[in-house]
Image (cartoon, helix red, strand yellow):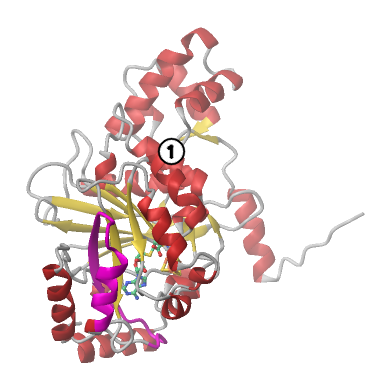
Amino acid sequence: MTVSLDLTADTTRDSLRARIAAPAKGELIGLTREELAEALITSGVVPERQAKMRVQQLWHWLYVRGVSDFADMFNISKDLRAELAKHFTIARPEIVEEQISSDGTRKWLFRFPPRGAGRPVEIETVYIPEEGRGTLCISSQVGCTLTCSFCHTGTQKLVRNLTAEEILAQLLTARDRLGDFPDRDTPAGAIVPAEGRKVSNIVMMGMGEPLYNFEAVKKALLIASDGDGLALSKRRITLSTSGVVPEIFRTGEEIGVMLAISLHATNDDLRDLLVPINKKFPLNELMDACRKYPGLSNARRITFEYVMLKDINDSLEDAKALVKLLKGVPAKINLIPFNPWPGSNYQCSDWEQIEKFADYINQAGYASPIRTPRGRDILAACGQLKSESERLKKSERLALEAMMIAGHGEA
Ligand code: SAH
Ligand code: SF4
C-alpha cells in the first residue's frame, strides 16, 4: 500500500516537519534516580558498576548547577561527555517569547517538541517576584479538559498532558533566565527578591488540572523537592486543584506538598455552574477529602481559592456560608479578584465589596489575603493563560485593555 501526502497542505507539511524535528535522543531530565541508572546502563554508555556514581554526578550537574549542556560537566571525562551527548539530551525548551511586566512579573511562552506523532506544543509559565520570595506558576497540561466558566484556559481544548521533563523544564529555564543557579548572573534591572533564591516557591496554578496528570506532576515535584538537587521545601510547593476528589488523598500521601482548592462557591448549584467538575464531585465529598488530607494541621493549612465575581458569589451571605463550610478545616482563604478576558461573562467585584467580604472572614478568624493581580499588562494573571496558537487578536487585546481600564483603573 502506498500513502501519498499532499505536501502543499500546510497541515501535512507541519506534521512532517514536526516528526523530523522529534527528539530521537532520550531525555534525562525528569527521570527518577533508578530510571536514570537504567537509561545509562541499557544505552551502553555507563557500565553497571559505575551507574550509581554517575547518577550522583549527573543529578548534581542537572539540578544543583543547572547545566543544560553535557560539555559543561567538568568532572566527567571528555569521552564520556561525548557519549552522553550522542545518546541523550538535557537541552532546554525553545523560548518563543519572554514578556516582562512593569511590576516585574515575567511570562514565558515555551515550545516543547512533539511527543510521538503529535505536534510541538506551547505553554506559559509565570514568575511573580515579591518582597522576600519569588513564585513560579507552572503549567501541568496544554489546555484543560475542564471548563470552569470564568477561566480563560478552560476555553482551550486539552491538547495533551505535559511530561515530568516538561514540567521541570519550566522551573529550570526560569531559573536560567533569572540567574538563579550558582555562578550565574541575574540580568541587570530584573526585579527579584533582594535575598535568597530567585525562585523560592512553586505553585501548580498555570494551565491545566494537575491532578488529571498525576504521575507526571508527582515525578516532577518529587525531583523539585529532592534535597540533593533542586531542594525546594515541600512547604513552598502548592498544588491547586479544581477538586479531583479521588486524587486528593494521594497528593498528600505520595507527593506531600501543600494543597489549594479552587472553591469559588459555597453551594452545589452555583459551583456546578462555575466549576463544572462539581457535578461529579460535589462539595460534601470535596470537603470530606480536605478533612482527610494527610499532614493537615494549623501549621499546614489548606488554601481555599475564591474568585470574586460581581453579584455572583460576593455577597456577605456568601462570606457567611464560606465560613460555615470551612468550619473545622485548618484553612487559609485566598480571595482572587476576577481577571477579565475577552468574551468572559463576568465582572470583577467592586473593590469595596471585596474588602467587606475579606473583613467578614477575617473577623471569623481566617487569614484572607486578597491576591493582588499581577502582570495584567502581559496577561499573566490567574486564568488568563493560553497558548500561542490561541493568542489574542489585536482587536481582542484592545478590548481587554479597555475592560481593565473600565473595571480597575489600570491597564
Ligand atoms: N486547574 C487548577 C490550577 C490552575 S487555575 C485549578 O483550577 O485549581 C489557578 C487558579 O486560578 C484557580 O484557583 C482558578 O480557579 C483561578 N482562576 C482561573 N481563571 C481565573 C480568572 N479569570 N480570574 C481569577 N482567577 C482565575
Ligand atoms: Fe482548568 Fe483550573 Fe481553568 Fe478550571 S480553573 S478550566 S480546572 S485550569
**Residue 373 visible:** yes
Residue 222 horizontal/vertical position (percent)? 39, 37
Whether 390 is drawn above or below 261: the answer is below
Circle 1 SS class: helix
Q: Which residue lies most toward the left here?
A: 194
In the displayed structure, 31 sits above or below 175; it is above
Q: Residue at x 92, y 54 (%)?
A: 1
Q: Nearer the viewer, residue 214 or 126?
A: 214
Which amino acid type is shown beneath numbered disc 1?
A: Glu
Query: Which residue is more in the foreground, 135 or 411?
Result: 135
> Which residue: 44% across, 36% down?
29
Based on the displayed image, in which of its 4 quarters is residue 69 positioned? top left
Q: Is residue 40 left or right of residue 383?
A: right
Query: Where residue 82 sits in the image (x, y, percent)?
Result: 47, 23
Residue 180 lies in quadrant: top left
Q: Which residue corresponds to the image point at 52% horizontal and 15% vertical from the top-left?
A: 46
| Residue pointed to by mark 1 | 254
356 within the magenta span: no
